[in-house]
Amino acid sequence: MALLQISEPGQSPDPHSHTPSRKLAAGIDLGTTHSLVAHVADGKPVLTAGEDGAPLLPSAVQYCADGTLTVGHQAQQNAISDPANTITSVKRLMGKSMADVDHSVHVTYQLITAESGMPLIRTCSGDVTPVEVSAEILKTLKRRSEAAQGGELQGVVITVPAYFDDAQRQATKDAARLAGLNVLRLLNEPTAAAVAYGLEKGSEGIHAIYDLGGGTFDISILRFSRGIFEVIATAGDTALGGDDFDRLIVDWISTQAGLAIATPSAALTAQLLSKARAAKEALSNQDAVTITIDLSNEKSDSTSWQGTLQRQTFDALIAPLIQRTLRACRRTLRDAAITTADVLEVVMVGGSTRVPRVRQMVGEFFAKQPMVDINPDQVVAIGAAIQADTLVGNKPDAEILLLDVTPLSLGLETMGGLVERLIPRNSTIPASRAQEFTTFKDGQTAMAIHVVQGERDLVDDCRSLARFELHNIPPMVAGAAKIRVTFQVDADGLLHVSAQEQTTGAYSAIDVKPSYGLAEAEIETMLRDSITYAEEDMESRRLKERQVDAQRLIEAIEAALDSDGDALLAPNERVVIESAIAALKQAISGDSHHAIKIATDTLEHDSADFAARRMDASIKKAMAGHTIDEFSNDSAAR
Ligand code: ADP
Ligand code: MG
């Protein structure tokens, strides 16, 4: 693996390093705790450092009362003294409504709910949206990269977690637009890591990307074949990462030091967390670490505490958390219908994969040495830079297609509140599928299309994404109209749904940009529920289907009674049919599919004679040489 060079900001670019025709591009890893920007110079990826000489930019923005703001290290340091105005981990809020925000993750700033239901952050210089905060981080990275490259960026690739839904991707694009960036493409973080390692230059096969960052864990399974990367499955945990390792060390210190403080002061908490983190990071390179805690400002018997944390002890503390990540790996492999033996390479991403015990357990799980040559917190930005360089047009013959995957199934509501899935979960994107639907009622001229996401059979158990209507359907008998509904998920994971009536071409479409995002935890819950409730769902599906069929039968017979009942039925015969209809209506309103079946059979039986007579009558009429016009009354009633 070639060493990566880090360029200094403001350093005047080498005039020979790029020809005038070369377009400037950059790759951005917009992370929860850290962000990075990189570009390709002389065919090699280069990370751009900040004023402090380090490429990692803490994803922190501090808003000051005088209207100014600071971004990065300075803001992160001020987070301790000015927690209310220093925004960290804003990535967790992107594209989410207040209802969807994971409130178990503690934030130091005040979140309020905007009229739209979206979160706003209250700062001393006014309320700001998560998109605006993100835009400030992006602006800083843009300035850095432009100073280092000596010109304006023509395009960037920004990475996002593979599980990011439409709203989260859209919010990321909005932030980029606000920062004045042209987004060539959003790229999934695992795919970027694979590109950084040049896995596309190797043999075809399956790779696992294990990403353990500060607050999140992601596992993605990529398949590389015929020059194409495909994310075939992805899962993870949005509340599991290196921060949890820190908290376990804090608990350990508290126990060792006998700090039985129910509500420790903010200063002590901050001190414990930062000492814990430093100890953890030190243990990646040494076997033991000495921790000193200053207690002089606390109501405590002693003024300080000192202890030694052995790597072995730390390893034992975090083992259950690593086990949790491995359980997610096992699930994802199952989703992808593969075993660890099928995995060619395991790529380590995220600062927490520096922990030796993590590397070891992941290596044992996959039974192979994970790839760790590229700095795990830079690997995503490097892949993004390589991809940006290609997409901006500097490598016209490069032909890597990077395909991603839908985290949940996409479908629409059909009669009876049932879901018809068009694009199953874990489908590779871009994806497109069309299916024909029809009208339920005679003369129906409009159709409501309700787009849903989820694995359950009933619409009520899925997540509603969008609704729209198709109008100007020519009036026809129920079931005659042909309406083609097309679902298209583009390369960025955004969904476009269209509906078209096939004879007149009447058309309606919608771009789904739901304002409410889905947390990874919710995705998991939805998947788990789909298994837990599989049997129950089958029951409800059967009930709904029976209800829909029965309703359709009732409407057909009622229409027939209207048109031919007087002519073809004796009053007592009609009463029998009408009471069978009433009985079936009664059964439909109940919840026994068995009762509906019996009442449906009864109605079919009781109306069979009537149906036969109608058939005879129409045949007789036709045989007698009548013109079609004479039936017009008949057909108008349908
Ligand atoms: P994110 O993608 O979530 O922004 P990163 O990939 O930058 O996060 O990882 C940040 C996490 O990595 C933090 O919890 C940090 O403490 C941890 N980390 C960084 N360096 C080390 C190290 N040397 N040993 C152990 N953990 C580390
Ligand atoms: Mg990351």
Image: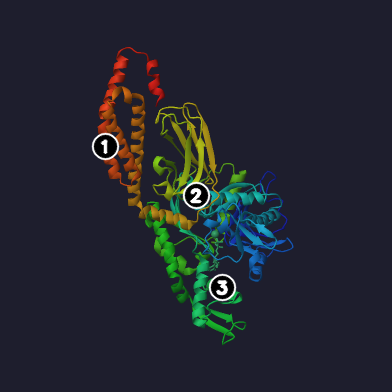
Q: Nearer the viewer, residue 618 or 333?
A: 618
Q: Nearer the viewer, residue 294 or 23?
A: 294
Looking at the picture, which amino acid does disc 3 mark? Leu
Count of marks, rendered view: 3
Three-letter code for the amino acid on which mark 2 is drawn? Glu
The quadrant in which residue 6 appears is bottom right
Q: Amino acid at mark 1?
A: Asp
Q: Is residue 246 above or below residue 610?
A: below
Residue 589 place in picture, x, y as percent: 35, 44
Q: Residue at x 51, y 83 (%)?
A: 258
Mark 3 or mark 2, earlier in chain:
2
The alpha-carbon separation of the residues under discs 1 and 2 comes to 61 Å
For disc 1, the neighbor class at 10 Å (few under 14, some 14 to 19, many from 20) is some
Q: Secondary structure at mark 2?
A: helix
Q: Measuring 43% from the left and 56% from the top, which residue is drawn there?
A: 525
Q: Earlier in the sequence, mark 1 or mark 2?
A: 2
Ligand 2 lies in quarter: bottom right
Relative horizontal placement of residue 407, taking residue 624 as reference (left or right): right
In front: 168, or 310? 168
Choose the circle earlier in sequence order: 3 or 1.
3
User: Looking at the image, is 483 positioned above or below residue 245?
Assistant: above
Q: Mark 3 highlights which residue?
A: 273
What is the number of the mark on residue 601? 1
Residue 319 image offset from top left, x and y in percent = 43, 70
The residue that mark 2 highlights is: 200
**Residue at mark 3 to residue at mark 2: CA–CA distance:** 40 Å
